[in-house]
Image (cartoon, grey):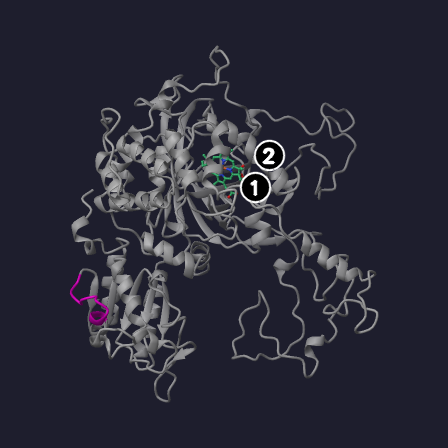
Amino acid sequence: MEPAKSENSTDGEPPVPGRPGRPAPQVDEPTDVHEPWPPKPDQTGPGMYSPTGNPLTAERGARAQTGAYLTTAQGLRLTESDHSLKAGERGPVLLQDHHLREKVMQFDHERIPERVVHARGAAAHGVFRGYGTASEISKAAFLAADVETPVFVRFSTVLGSRGSADTVRDTRGFATKFYTTEGVFDLVGNNIPVFFIQDAIKFPDVIHAGKPHPDREIPQAQSAHDTFWDFVSLHTEATHHTIWNMSDRAIPRSFRMMEGFGVHTFRMVDARGGTTLVKFHWKPKAGVHSLLWEEAQLLGGMDPDFHRRDLADAIEAGAYPEWELGVQTFPDTPEQTFEGIDLLDPTKIVPEELAPVQPIGLLQLNANPTNFFAETEQVAFHPGHLVPGIDITDDPLLAGRLFSYLDTQISRLGGPNFPQVPVNRTHAPVNDMQRDAMHQTAVHSGVAPYRPNSLDGGCPFLAGTEDHGYVEVPVPVPAATKVREAPASFSDHTSHPRRFWLSLTPTEREHVVAAYTFELSKCDENAVKERNLRVLADIDPELCGQVAAGLGLPAPGPSGPLPDVTPSPALAQIKGSWPVTGRVIGIIADDGADLDSVRTLREAVLDGGMVPLVVGPHGGRLGGRPGGGEPVVVQRTFANARSVEFDAILLAGTPARGDDAYGARDAKAGQDPAAADTDPRLLPLLSEAYRHAKPLGGWADSADLLAAAGCPPHAPGVIVGDEPRAVLAEITGLLRYHRVWDRFPARIATG
Ligand code: HDE
């Protein structure tokens, strides 16, 4: 039935400037007033997901937006929604206003408890394709060659609340839900391969120490405070994870440029029942890259959603992020050690040089969530969601997690029926005989939800292994006495952090020193600083000495001989060259620039799989004068752009000075006279990018502006040429190394 003429189409009604979820209007505002749109396909209910991750089919009967009219939750069409029902225009509001009560009641309960850890996150749908290389060691169906499995991946920070900034120094969560044909498999990992503690019973302690202080609830999303450093210095098994957190790994450039790790050792089971111990690794195709600390801090203020935006923008632009899943494999011996490293200790790694990571499949993220709450917030991961071919080990940290992740959903998602939330639903058939409970949405039929039964013909039936039934590996449990103790190997807390330190390049080590110095300087208690220096002294005297110097405290000596370890070059980040897909290029131009070349360049950047952002002196469009060719749309202005948004910056000449532009005069005060002919708002933008070792390029008369900003045209990574495409080609070549590392000549990476 055609909807009746809407109130929106009444003459004199204010114009409707486009609607959420509709294509942006192609005309300048105000837009034409129009009839209500029919519902979009994805407004008919929570969707299932196709192997490519896109919302595909609507579930019949699911309740969501299913009509053009505004209704109550009961489907009653409403004629008015802006005023409460009152006894006269100025009279009291009537309790009988069912619409007001329903609307406010729903609103009062819109929030659910945020996750106790990993509250802040961003997610995407995608697809995983098995290479088949794992099939010799695991019978998991989704690992077989060319099998495509839909996935949902959520990235997160650990300590901050839901509204905290993305670029804080913290571990990042990397949790993947594989909707396999044999049930859901969750790989709930982090971007750091080790953890602070070896036993789950310490988890509340480490998190209480890291979270804001309970009296004032500050600081937010930080480890730079007394309680964190108090705990980690008293509990030195945290040292390895802590040094990773003080490295650049804890301030990633992008979720797309992080490694992921399963942390614990898992057990794979082949079709004949043979077992292999494995550690999972996600390797980003874009390489592992980080922000500089100053960038991370600036972004925390100017774009607290930087990582969330980056992920969504890249996917929307078609620059789909990819990771290879790999495994390190170890023989499943009774000792469960490899080259002397205890595989059950989650504070230890096995260097890749000793056990190479073998690729077993490819993950691609290719669709953004349709609704943040329904998907990203309500997704519930659990390390105990396993499939045939993958089993757990006796890592005591993992054991506690197997309890925690189910338990936490009871208060977070309000009961045990969270597997029915669309994003949590398995794509395999479910016949579980679970019934009732809060938020039950299924209508189960039959009278015999128990086993054995005869009334339902004995159905559902138990599966054999040949029917993909899950069988725990019959691992022998040694005769033992109950104790609250850890094995002796768990007490080595220094050799692995020392290996990490020794494996970094000089530039990365300098960042580690700066991070420790910054964080410890934020502690008020001298005793806490001094105890941490003693921990550092047992890792490396140089590290300890430099941090102590920064704190203005004496450097203690090591408590004993330093462990003799071999560095693992695989741990360093500054090495190799990488694809530039999804990198963001700022193009600075003004109305007088050669806009044809700006347009050509924009296209070239897009063709290279990167994202161009035109930065102009004002919003709207550049050019558009008669005979001046097509105008160019501006995405950022000189007043609102900061260098931290860009991986590289290009200049289409030197923009004219905007004396009368907003803010220009203030910014100019105190500038070098050499800068007099340039727009002063660009100087900090360029000098900041230069300081952060980003490639800078330009053509036309851009050398003037670069020089004024302190970026000499012949300095490393500053490219000035005549032909924009040639300049772009050189800049792209530099971007493959992430930064122009030569700008730190004293600290050039040797690793
Ligand atoms: Fe978690 N962790 N964790 N964790 N964890 C949670 O589960 C917990 C640990 C990790 O995007 C919680 O649903 C305990 C290691 C990620 O939804 C909670 C212990 C690793 C996420 C929980 C650990 C992780 C969580 C909070 C020590 C890396 C976010 C909400 C025994 C291998 C998942 C929730 C998402 C979330 C408990 C240690 C990764 C409370 C008890 C080690 C990526 O259940």
Q: What segment is highlighted magenta in the picture?
A: 706-715
> In the image, what residue occupies the spot 64% across and 36% down?
430
Magenta span: predominant SS is loop
Secondary structure of the residue carrying tag 2 is helix
Q: Do we see residue 351 in this rendering?
A: no
Residue tagged by mark 1?
A: 380
Q: Position of residue 335 (x, y in %)?
A: 38, 17
> In the image, what residue occupies the spot 22% across and 53% down?
741
Q: Position of residue 370 (x, y in %)?
A: 56, 56
Q: Residue furthest bottom?
A: 626
Q: Is mark 2 within 8 Å of ligand 1?
A: yes
Mark 2 or 1: the one toward you: 2
Three-letter code, disc 1: Ala
Q: Are marks 2 and 1 in contact (CB under 8 Å)?
A: no
Q: Which mark is residue 407?
A: 2
Q: Name the residue nearer the viewer: 584 or 389.
A: 584
Label 2 to label 1, Cα distance in Å? Answer: 11 Å
Q: Position of residue 517 (x, y in %)?
A: 30, 44
User: Within the magenta stretch, is there residue 707?
Assistant: yes
> In the image, what residue occupies the spot 21% across and 77% down?
673
